[in-house]
């Protein structure tokens, strides 16, 4: 006799939306090649025409980087959209089950915030695709910015409604929140979702030349970014207290590093806002101030990287959920910290060290720091491919011994 062995992903959880988020984040890491190695004198970001011009005039290294970047962006954006659509289908099925109602009345309700997080990431990914692959997009971009603001704003409203349902339920009556199960940073997922909305809303502030668009982007991105920050602080403090009492929940161990992507998206939001304030409202921030700001964000990231790796190592997380017999959708939460560190290292190097004159572009020190960013990136590419095979690989027929 034999029976069909289901894939781990067939036992669906809202955390599988993180598979889409991780793929979208990796697309951003490949966009960094173009952002900092392709000249773009007429726009704050490289567009199709800049890339083609760099290809025609560039050296072999630059041409290789362009090919790698465009291929990486195309592949991971396809994966991003593919897993987003798949998850929406699974969510629709899940809402019809008793397990959904049970989730909505537990601490795990905040797992549903992985959905607006994934949507916000996909909107960002689509904008990157437009910049890289669509000719003459920049000629109509001022018409696209209001549409992007509306899309991100609606996503943010959806996230706030979901958070409101959760907080309204647990704060209106006592005993509805299990403090003993709060022993991880899982409750920071809503803050991450709001921060992803905020960084998307800040993009027009840095790129638009229309004062009303820039001003609107500054206001609404600050609104969602500040809420994300407050929520993260409250959730982290209460969670840390629970972890000191009960230890860190083993399966939720990767959430200890959710602070890392949170810092990256909020850091990029700050950079975009500063650029918009400078170009539109004549508010100046010098390179040294930017370096110090990014260094503070990076310091927080390194702190939580060390904390997370220490706890995961002591718990044997990798041997259990990455190479062992058990599987967890939460393993995809490991992708975001590595992606975030790769992106933040690129910004810290180019917008901080190079801009402040501490490191010469293309010097030996420059390439050492680039190597660190690429190490994080390649490690996350390998991790995503491993997790996809492990969770979404084909179902297998396995032999069942006769009784």
Image (spheres, rainbow, N blue to C red):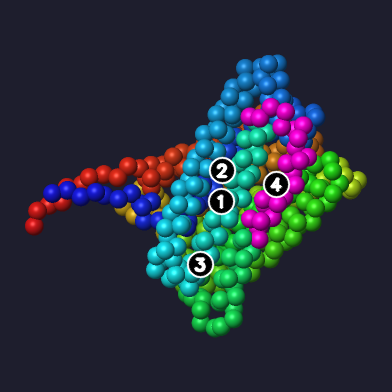
Seen at 73% across and 35% down, the residue is: 45
Q: Magenta span has 155?
A: yes
Give me the residue at 54% from left, 48% from top. Answer: 21
Q: Measure the C-alpha gap from mark 1 to mark 2.
A: 8 Å
Q: Dot 3: what SS?
A: helix
Q: Position of residue 299 (x, y in %)?
A: 66, 52
Residues rendered magenta in the picture = 133-157
Q: Quadrant of the C terminus?
A: bottom left
Q: Earlier in the sequence, mark 3 or mark 1?
A: 3
Q: In the rendered image, which residue does mark 4 sit on?
A: 148
Image marks 1 and 2: residues in contact by CB distance under 8 Å = yes
Left or right of 286? Residue 115 is left
Farthest bottom residue in view: 174
> Which comes sooner in the sequence, label 4 or label 2?
2
Mark with earlier residue (4, 3): 3
Asked where in the image residue 169 lies, by quadrant, the reply is bottom right
Measure the C-alpha gap from mark 1 to mark 4: 15 Å
Residue 24: numbered disc? 2
Look at the image and tell me whether residue 159 can be seen.
yes
Mark 2 closeness class: few <14, some 14–19, many ≥20 residues within 10 Å: many
Asked if residue 139 is positioned above or below residue 164 in the image, the reply reads above
Rendered location of residue 393, percent (x, y)? 35, 42
Residue 77: percent from left, percent from top: 55, 38
């Amino acid at each position: 006799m034999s029976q069909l062995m289901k894939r781990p992903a067939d036992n669906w959880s809202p955390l599988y939306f993180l598979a889409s988020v991780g793929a979208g984040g990796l697309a951003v890491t490949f966009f960094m090649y173009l952002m900092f190695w392709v000249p773009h004198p007429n726009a704050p970001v490289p567009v199709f025409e800049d890339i083609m011009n760099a290809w025609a005039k560039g050296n072999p290294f630059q041409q290789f980087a362009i090919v790698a970047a465009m291929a990486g962006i195309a592949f991971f954006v396809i994966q991003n959209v593919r897993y987003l659509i798949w998850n929406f289908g699974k969510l629709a099925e899940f809402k019809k089950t008793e397990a959904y109602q049970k989730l909505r009345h537990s601490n795990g309700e905040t797992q549903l915030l992985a959905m607006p997080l994934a949507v916000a990431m996909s909107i960002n990914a689509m904008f990157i695709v437009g910049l890289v692959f669509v000719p003459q997009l920049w000629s109509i971009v001022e018409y696209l910015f209001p549409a992007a603001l509306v899309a991100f704003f609606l996503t943010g409203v959806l996230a706030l409604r979901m958070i409101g349902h959760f907080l309204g339920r647990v704060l209106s009556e006592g005993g509805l929140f299990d403090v003993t199960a709060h022993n991880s940073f899982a409750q920071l997922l809503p803050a991450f979702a709001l921060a992803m909305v905020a960084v998307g809303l800040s993009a027009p502030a840095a790129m638009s030349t229309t004062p009303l668009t820039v001003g609107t982007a500054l206001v609404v991105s600050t609104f969602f970014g500040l809420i994300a920050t407050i929520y993260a602080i409250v959730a982290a403090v209460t969670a840390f207290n629970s972890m000191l009492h009960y230890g860190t929940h083993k399966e939720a161990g990767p959430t200890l590093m959710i602070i890392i992507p949170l810092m990256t998206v909020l850091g990029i939001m700050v950079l975009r806002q500063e650029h918009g304030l400078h170009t539109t409202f004549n508010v100046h921030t010098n390179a040294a101030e930017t370096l110090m700001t990014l260094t503070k964000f990076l310091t927080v990231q390194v702190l939580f990287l060390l904390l997370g790796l220490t706890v995961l190592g002591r718990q044997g997380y990798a041997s259990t959920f990455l190479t062992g017999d058990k599987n967890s959708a939460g393993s995809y939460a490991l992708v975001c910290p590595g992606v975030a560190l790769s992106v933040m290292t690129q910004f810290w190097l180019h917008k901080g060290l190079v801009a402040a004159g501490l490191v010469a572009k293309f010097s030996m020190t420059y390439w050492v720091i680039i190597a660190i960013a690429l190490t994080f990136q390649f490690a996350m590419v390998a991790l995503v491919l491993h997790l996809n095979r492990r969770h979404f690989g084909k179902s297998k027929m396995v032999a069942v011994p006769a009784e």
